[in-house]
Image (spheres, rainbow, N blue to C red):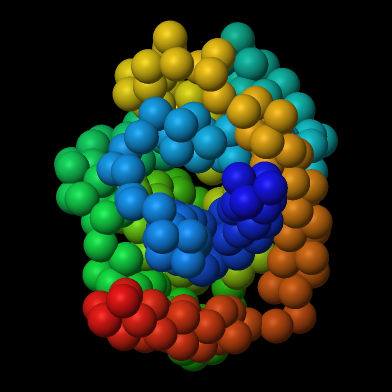
Amino acid sequence: MIALLKVIIMGIVQGLSEFLPVSSSAHLVFTSHLIQLITHNPIKENSSYDIVLSMMLHIGTLIAVLIFFRKEVSEIWNALVTGIKTKNFSDYNAKLGLYIIIGTIITIITALMMNDTAERLMETPAVVGVLLIVTGGMLSGAEKYSDSLNKKSDKVSLKTAVLMSIAQGFAVLPGFSRSGWTIAAGMFNKTSRVACARYSFLLSIPIILGASIVYPLKEINITELLSYNWTNILIGTIVSAVVGYFCIKYFLNFLAKYSLRAFAYYCFAAGFAAAIFFTFA
């Protein structure tokens, strides 16, 4: 029962925090360590089961973004294929397709340089809390800069796409929100928050796919897979997908009317609380 409750809670946390600018990796670290403190179970570093569970929770959010943006994904794919055939990428959707390909490469290169650090940070929730505070600063700074502009673009340029891709690479560090850092990076280049958010979600597709499938397959023990409680894992995946879908929907509506400051304040508060609590826990 405790195991089922754990995957449901982690599914909800993943679905909410993957797309909200509050760092899903930080909240999964906090949740996992908190549950293990409460249940008095020792922390198993990089256990095969935890890697598989994390992989499936990320697949849940990948399903959510693919379903929600199914029309945009189809349009971008068709425009990209047409652009490749005709060697004409004047169509905006074709450009977005190219940006996503280029951006994915940039993200991978950036993330690989910090991967070892990211893995070590997964076992230090207090430090992750400090990084979450830094994310709050990024969000607050981006909003302050955006407010000072007279005009903001509703389309993502190549420069914006590159900056967002670098930011996405840095977000491999737990506490650095992927959505938060990418949206903030785009806003610092004079792009509207809604345009940045939509592109951020599209840019996440190949990265979530790679992070949730390709990388974990190198780490897990295939022979142990049959021993796992797949009922619980699949329940967590479904919860992650459903929560993620509605999170995207309402987050985009929120950004059309309000700023990111509320999330910045949350990151400040949650990061500070986590840093203090896990330092002494």
Q: Position of residue 47 (x, y in %)?
A: 36, 34
**Is there any visible trace of residue 140 in the rendered image?**
no
- At a point 65% along the width and 26% down the height, the residue shown is 230
The quadrant of the image that shows the C terminus is bottom left
Quick one: 279 or 103, which is closer to the camera? 279
**Which residue is nearer to you in this view: 18 or 236?**
236
Residue 155 found in image quarter: bottom right
In this rendering, does residue 68 appear at all? Answer: yes
**x%, y% of residue 184?**
46, 69
Report the residue that reaches farthest toward the front. Answer: 40
Instruction: Answer with left or right where residue 275 lies relative to residue 29.
Output: left
Q: Is residue 49 left or right of residue 63?
A: left
- On screen, residue 243 above or below 51: below
Which quadrant of the view contains residue 237? top right
Q: Position of residue 129 (x, y in %)?
A: 34, 73
Left or right: where 192 falls relative to 267: right
Residue, x 45% and y 38% (percent of image)? 50
- Looking at the image, residue 112 lies above or below residue 267: above
Identify which residue, 76 or 152, lies in the foreground: 76
Residue positioned 50% across, 39% down in the render = 54
The image shows a total of numbered marks equal to 0
Observer-nearest of 13 and 196: 13
Percent of width and height locating residue 62: 64, 37
Report the residue at 43% width, 12% height from top: 222
